[in-house]
C-alpha cells in the first residue's frame, strides 16, 4: 500500500449552494468560509481523505475532514480529478451537511 500526502495551497471561495434540487449562486460570504488550502491523503494514487483549511458545511467542524463522494475515491488523482475536487469544494451541499450557513451568506436562486 502506497500512502502519499499532498498539500495544496490554493484559495477557494464558495460559489454555489445545492439544496432540495435547487441551485443558488453565492453572492457574498463571511471570511471564515474562504478555504485557504487543503491536504489530500492518497492511497495507491487515489483520493482517500481531504482536510480543508477553513470552514465548509460539508466538512467536520472540528477536524476539517471533507466529505468526498465515493465516486471520486475510485478515480486516480490527476489534474482532472483535482479540478473536480476543487469544484466540489466551491459548492455547498445543504441536503447533507454538518451545519447550514443560510443566515450568514447572501445568495440568489440560479436560473437553469
Image (cartoon, grey):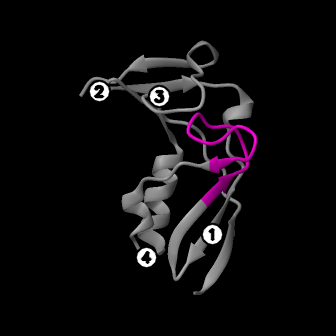
Would you say the residues marked 4 and 1 are in contact, meaning their CB atoms lie under 8 Å apart?
no
Q: CA distance from mark 1 to mark 2?
A: 31 Å
Q: Position of residue 100 (x, y in %)?
A: 57, 22
Q: Which mark is residue 26?
A: none
- First in sequence: mark 4 or mark 3? 4
Q: CA distance from mark 3 to mark 1?
A: 25 Å
Q: CA distance from mark 4 to mark 3?
A: 27 Å
Q: Position of residue 13 (x, y in %)?
A: 60, 40
- Mark 2: few, some, or many residues within 10 Å (few <14, many ≥20)? few
Question: Which contiguous range is marked in magenta?
Answer: 50-65
Q: Which residue is mark 4?
A: 76
Q: Which residue is mark 2?
A: 21
**Residue appearing at x 56%, y 77% in the figure:** 43
> What quarter of the picture does the N terminus occupy?
bottom right
- First in sequence: mark 3 or mark 1? 1
**Residue appearing at x 59%, y 19% in the figure:** 105
**Residue appearing at x 49%, y 19% in the figure:** 107
Q: Is residue 47 above or below residue 107?
A: below
Element under disc 1: strand
Q: CA distance from mark 4 to mark 2?
A: 29 Å
Q: Is residue 36 above or below residue 25?
A: below
**With 78 as the anchor, is 105 left or right in this view?**
right
- First in sequence: mark 1 or mark 2? 2
Q: CA distance from mark 2 to mark 3?
A: 10 Å
Q: Which residue is mark 1?
A: 41
Q: Position of residue 23 (x, y in %)?
A: 35, 27
- Mark 1: few, some, or many residues within 10 Å (few <14, many ≥20)? some
- First in sequence: mark 2 or mark 3? 2
Q: Nearer the viewer, residue 103 or 107?
A: 103
Q: Which mark is residue 94?
A: 3
Element under disc 4: loop
Amino acid at each position: 500500500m502506497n500512502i502519499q500526502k499532498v498539500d495544496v495551497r490554493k484559495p477557494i471561495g464558495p460559489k454555489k449552494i445545492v439544496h432540495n434540487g435547487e441551485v443558488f449562486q453565492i453572492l457574498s460570504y463571511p471570511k471564515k468560509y474562504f478555504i485557504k488550502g487543503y491536504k489530500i491523503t492518497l492511497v495507491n494514487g487515489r483520493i482517500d481523505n481531504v482536510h480543508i483549511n477553513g470552514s465548509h458545511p460539508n466538512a467536520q467542524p472540528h477536524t476539517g475532514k471533507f466529505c468526498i463522494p465515493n465516486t471520486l475515491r475510485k478515480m486516480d488523482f490527476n489534474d482532472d480529478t483535482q479540478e473536480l475536487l476543487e469544484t466540489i469544494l466551491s459548492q455547498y451541499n445543504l441536503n447533507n451537511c454538518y451545519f447550514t450557513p443560510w443566515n450568514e451568506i447572501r445568495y440568489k436562486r440560479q436560473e437553469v
